[in-house]
Amino acid sequence: MSSVIRQIPLDTATQHHSHDFHQIVIGLQGRAEFEIEGLGGAISALSGCIVPANHVHYYVGQGKNRQLILDLPADAPSLTGYHHELSRLFDAPRFFALDKPLQHYLDFLLLEQSSSQDSLSAAQSDRLAATFLGCLHARLGGETPPPAKRRLNLAKLDRFIDRHLAAPISVADLAGQACLSEAHFSSCFREQTGLSPWQYVRRRRLEAARRLLEESRMPLSQIAVSTGFAHQSALSHAFRSAFGCPPSQLRRAVLERPSPLDATNRLQHTT
């Protein structure tokens, strides 16, 4: 399948969905807020976000707004063959700002789009998308790390993550704890853990949420906020994907579980 480039305003009422293709959303006018599986942020003119395939995302436009959206199937020419490395952009959701060169390329892309009598052809869309993705990849993930890979102090990173579970945690925050560049840190982290930093943080958020469900009577909405999820429904979707059941089901099972005191009382009663 080919890439699709389109412009739309976002609804001013909160919506959410997921889809089986990757997406780049770039603000052209106004402001919009996104929450992508626990990672929240806002985009305005000349900034954007990366939405990996099959990630539930909440979004809402504010007032008069307009976005440029690149829909990118995993098998699109802009992400396969010679361009296969660009698919690494979608290892995790992310927010970004366009620098001057990318702003100029965006202007060119918009001119190409407006000069087309109908819509951009599939070949045009793929060429324009591949160029943009290549430039974005060079800025966000194209740095070549030094050949020697150092071992990361995961215990230190765990302590930092656990202290900041309720707040947004970026790769830059984690890289700063290791005194490494983002690209070098991400490369070392994936090699050491088999996960991207975002996947690792998400797992710790979910583990913390499960502990709170089992050990406290905190409302689900409060657990979601305490562990870095913008909405209870976002926690529920991520929890079901990770553990095979919604958090409400685990909470019910915990509440129905007999306490040690109940068991002791029953034993005394029978004797």
Image (spheres, rainbow, N blue to C red):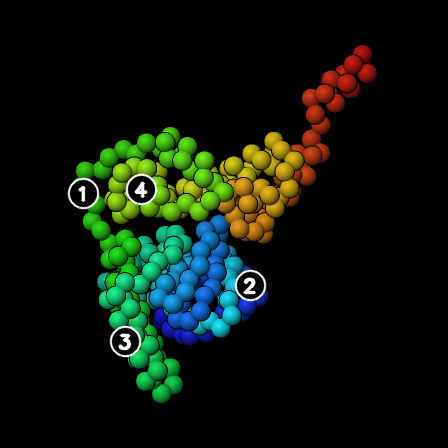
Give the residue drawn at x 45%, y 35%: 163
SS label for mark 3? helix
Point out which mark residue 175 bears: 4
Mark 3 → mark 1, Cα distance in angstroms: 35 Å
Residue 55 visible (yes or no): no
Point out which mark residue 146 bears: 1
Give the residue drawn at x 78%, y 14%: 268
Which badge, 4 or 2, is on the more N-terminal residue? 2
Mark 4 → mark 2, Cα distance in angstroms: 33 Å
Q: How far across and how far down the image is residue 251, in percent?
A: 65, 39
Mark 2 surroundings within 10 Å by alpha-carbon count, few (fewer than 14), some (14 through 19), many (20 or more): few
Q: Are marks 3 and 1 in contact (CB under 8 Å)?
A: no
Q: How far across and how far down the image is residue 146, in percent?
A: 18, 43
Residue, far bottom: 117
What's the residue type where badge 2 is placed?
Answer: Gln
Residue 13 visible (yes or no): yes
SS label for mark 2? strand
What's the residue type where badge 3 is placed?
Answer: Phe
SS label for mark 4? helix
Mark 1 surroundings within 10 Å by alpha-carbon count, few (fewer than 14), some (14 through 19), many (20 or more): few
Give the residue drawn at x 29%, y 55%: 140
Q: Are marks 4 and 1 in contact (CB under 8 Å)?
A: no
Point out which mark residue 15 bears: 2
Mark 3 surroundings within 10 Å by alpha-carbon count, few (fewer than 14), some (14 through 19), many (20 or more): few
Mark 3 → mark 4, Cα distance in angstroms: 34 Å
Which badge, 4 or 1, is on the more N-terminal residue? 1
Q: Nearer the viewer, mark 3 or mark 1?
A: 3
* Res. 248 image quadrant: top right
Could you say which is closer to the camera, residue 192 or residue 201?
201
Q: Which residue is mark 3?
A: 108
Number of marks drawn: 4
Query: Which image quarter is the C terminus in?
Result: top right
